[in-house]
Image: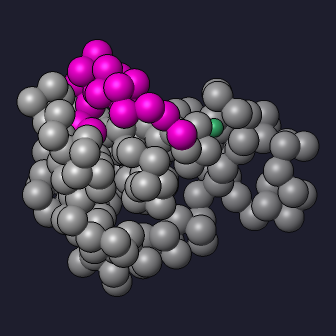
Amino acid sequence: MDAGEVRFIADSMLGRLATWLRILGYDTLYFRDAQDGRLVALARREGRILLTRDTQLLMRRRLCPMLFVRHDRVWEQLRQVTGELGLSMGPRLGSRCLRCNRSLAPLAKARAAGRVPEYIFRRHDVFFHCEGCGRVFWGGTHLTHMEETVRALCG
Ligand SMILES: [Zn+2]
């Protein structure tokens, strides 16, 4: 399944899972305290799969696409979701802002000047930024590390 097709909204118990889905590049909404009704309404309106650990919420599964997450540990949760939906783990890794869920846009090196530490600027040529929060990201070790972590735990 293409990452551009599937989008999520996670319930309040699934914050870590939401972050990891964003790391993998999947559009995932998360609110620390949203009413169940609001989650369902957003899932319906935006065509998102509602991820939930809440059996109460599960009773509304006819109202919107829903996936009941059976596990407590985030790695098992991630394995379940990617497995059941047949999601790929690698191609869009790091393409999304972890804080605000927006897709990152390429940033010309010259425009990254002054927005990242000097040693980072000197050492890297590929930069991205988030148009939501303004953070600048760069290719390199943190991505490699993420990829290794994902592979080790879910591969
Ligand atoms: Zn952002």
Residue 16 included in the magenta stretch of the image: no
Instruction: Out of 119 and 95, give the one closest to the viewer.
Output: 95
Residue 109 sits above or below residue 94 on the image: above
- Across and down, in percent, residue 55 comes to 22, 51
Residue at image coords 15%, 40%: 59
The answer to whether 111 is drawn above or below residue 97 in the figure is: above
| Magenta range | 33-50
**Residue, x 61% and y 44% (percent of image)?**
99
Quarter location, residue 129:
top right
Colour scheme of this structure image? one colour
State the image coordinates of residue 145 (x, y, percent, origin top left): 52, 75
Residue farthest front in this picture = 56
Residue 137: x, y in percent? Answer: 66, 50
Name the side, left or right, on which 118 lies relative to 69: right
Q: Is residue 104 visible?
A: no
Residue at image point 34% right, 83% down? 152
Q: Quick check: can you spot residue 141? A: yes
